Image (spheres, rainbow, N blue to C red):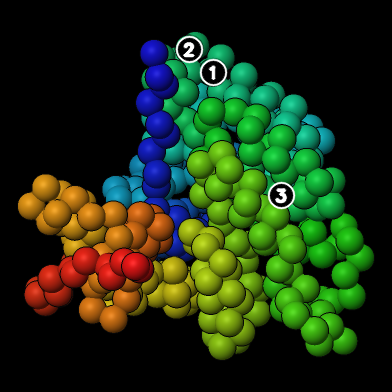
Amino acid sequence: MTEPARPVRPRRSVLAVPGSSPRMLAKAPGLGADEVFLDLEDAVAPDAKVAARANVIASLAAGDWTGKTVAVRVNDTSTGWAYRDVVDVVEAAGAHLDCVLLPKVQRPEQIAWLDLLLGQIEQAVGLPATGIGIEAQVEDARGLAAVDAIAAASDRLEALVFGPADFMASITMRSLVVGAQPPGYDIGDAYHYVLMRILVAARAHDLLAIDGPYLQLGDPDGLRQVAARSAALGYDGKWVVHPDQIDLVNETFTPSQSDYDHAERILAAYQHAISPGGGERGAVRLGPEMIDEASRKMAAVVAAKGRAAGLTRNPTPIPTPTPTPTAG
């Protein structure tokens, strides 16, 4: 029997919320981010880890998270906190949790460990089997080198996430501005290979690909530029670290109304063309362009992202497709 596919949850904007801040945890459910992850890792000081765990459990149970994907970023597997993060949070509040985000993933075995532990907890406390997904954060050279194996490590995996700050440090990039081009790098994009490598691994295993944060809060133009870069490649969303970044990132990862309308017209016209009533043609002309099965696939991507963002098609007439001229 084929296993049901994991849900595809919208993740245009993914808001990081420190587990050590009850005020921010209380505010997060009312913000416009598609996903919120409650952070037990980098945003929490070592002495505050245990208290943050309790805060996160209380927030998951008490908050109204309707309409959002909700995740918890646990500490990485090299620390003494990771096991207890997973056990305490999932046992107490797993019914309110969509995903566990595992940072600093370098090997597929780390994902397998989390998968096994989640399964044991689900069985012990009566949660649906495999109901909690996993997001894997790739943050260094070793993780990138193993990204294909990481992407294939568990059926629970829903997304690969790029962690730019740790990655920049791991390759000794000469920059202190996370996500921006390093000073002196004036040819191309210093992050293109990394972003594309993660994206290809994600798509090869039907996963979402999420870009990491841009930490310059007073620079909306810089945020727009880096978000547009990853959106153009095909990324599904980007982390945000402040509520002021949410609307800009949501907009950037939502197709324009004109692109969405055009994609829906292509889908409708192609469906008509391949039907008996449309002559069962595989390639037709729609206005000034030729469309075929490849066009349908491209349009389906844009249409799916638009629908997920809540767009509706403008009621404009669909041009009647005409047969493609043949040679000879």
Q: Is residue 200 above or below residue 259?
A: above
What residue does disc 3 label?
138
- In the depicted view, which residue is nearer to us: 97 or 62? 97
Distance of label 3 from label 2 (alpha carbons): 29 Å
Q: Amino acid at mark 1?
A: Gly
What residue does disc 2 label?
123
Res. 214 visible in picture: yes
**Horizontally, is 159 left or right of 142 in the view?**
left
Locate residue 41, reporting x and y percent. Answer: 68, 48
* Quadrant in the rendering for residue 281: bottom left
- In the depicted view, which residue is nearer to us: 34 or 140? 140
Locate residue 192, reporting x and y percent. Answer: 71, 68
Q: Earlier in the sequence, mark 3 or mark 2?
A: 2
Locate residue 115, reporting x and y percent. Answer: 60, 25
Circle 1 residues within 10 Å: few <14, some 14–19, many ≥20: some
Q: Is residue 186 above or below residue 141?
A: below
* Quadrant in the rendering for residue 157: top right
Q: Amino acid at mark 3?
A: Val
Q: Secondary structure at mark 1?
A: helix
What residue does disc 1 label?
119
